[in-house]
Image (cartoon, grey):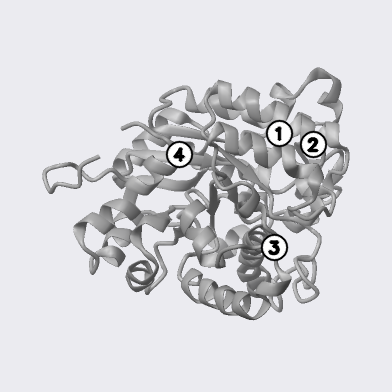
Amino acid sequence: MSATPSTPVVTVDADGHVLEPRDTWLEYIAPAYRERAIRIDHDSQGLEVLLIDGKPLEAVRGRLAGLGGVEMDPTELLTTGRYRYEEGCPPGSWDPAERLRILDQEGIDIALLYPTIGICWEGHVQDPKLAHAYTEAYNRWLCDFCGHDPKRLVPIMHLNLLDVDLAVKEMRRAHAAGCRGIYISPDMYARGRRRFDDPALDPFWSAAQELGLPVAFHVVVRDQPTTSYADPLDDTNGARFGLFNFAFLAIDVMAAFTELLTTGVLERYPRLKVTVLESGANWISAWLDRLDHKFEVMHARTILKMKPSEYFKRQCLVSADPDETITAEVVKHVGAQYFVWASDYPHIDASMGVVREMRERLKPLPAADQRLVLGDNALRFYGLAH
């Protein structure tokens, strides 16, 4: 695509979300698993609970509306327990026609769409066939949602790695149905605590490379601690640890990206594409510098043949958040061709007007670089037409 001034700038939201209707899994799951479908119910105190295979996710008990909540009062959503899930779900999160209206209002041409309830269950399911049934049900619903306008609403399939053969089977089915990328949890619980370089996962990486499907890491919600420091169930009202835990969600993504990079997966799969989401992007420059320095010290004890930054630049993108303050300088330092941006709509920490904010952040860059970050990189990486 030409970068001439007369060519309209294409704006691609690389990480938008849906809020799945509460009956999504009941309606779309394979009949054999309907009794174990993800559902929303109430506990003995009348609080809404998200049931995963019949067991509640404690991290969101009474706060399911907070899974959405864009433009709502976060204090009310996260503390009172009086809002229903649907009250935090703006129409654009579950109605494709309304989502297109939001895209037009915001000045977004294309949105890549990821789950919300779908980022909550994986660490709590260790039955591979049930996990497969959950992902297949979601992917079928999402393709129906995006079928309203498949050029502007782009489905990103959700895959689980407990059973790699089932994951590859679903990858091929969902790709044929129109999905243009893959979301996998960064959480080790979601992959049976296997490292990314485990030979059992090779068929997954091989198939993703063969199909040209970018694999994305995204933050997750769970009851298990991220590290020995973080504990989502510590101090339920959030006064002590709520901010810490919320901020620490990004660490999972950064750690998964670093594991993939340093264990040689990108060395063995040189055409595999990886996107790093919802951890911001301003950290990437310092982190690649650090990895490259440690590589120089450890090169005799690593299987990597190039500097970590060279694998990143060959195969990866990272997503910038609109509220980051030095994005232009980081993009200038690393290279504009390695960045996308994301709205995170309609989550509680998202806001409206983010395209204007993102354009303002990128204003110090040359126009051609702004185009790359705003949309052209996503078009290229995901093979999207516009």
Q: Which residue is mark 2?
A: 131
- Observer-side mark, 3 or 1, equals 3
Image quarter of the N terminus:
top left
Residue 170: give x, y in percent of width and height: 69, 28
Cα distance in 3D space between marks 4 and 3: 29 Å
Q: Secondary structure at mark 3?
A: loop
Lateral position of residue 110 relative to residue 248, left or right? left
**N-terminal of the two: label 4 or label 1?**
1
Mark 3 Cα shell of 10 Å, populated few (<14), some (14-19), many (≥20): some
**Would you say the residues marked 2 and 1 are in contact, meaning their CB atoms lie under 8 Å apart?**
yes
**Would you say the residues marked 4 and 1 are in contact, meaning their CB atoms lie under 8 Å apart?**
no
- Observer-side mark, 2 or 3, equals 3
Cα distance in 3D space between marks 3 and 1: 33 Å
Cα distance in 3D space between marks 2 and 1: 6 Å
Residue 303, label in figure: 3
Mark 4 Cα shell of 10 Å, populated few (<14), some (14-19), many (≥20): some
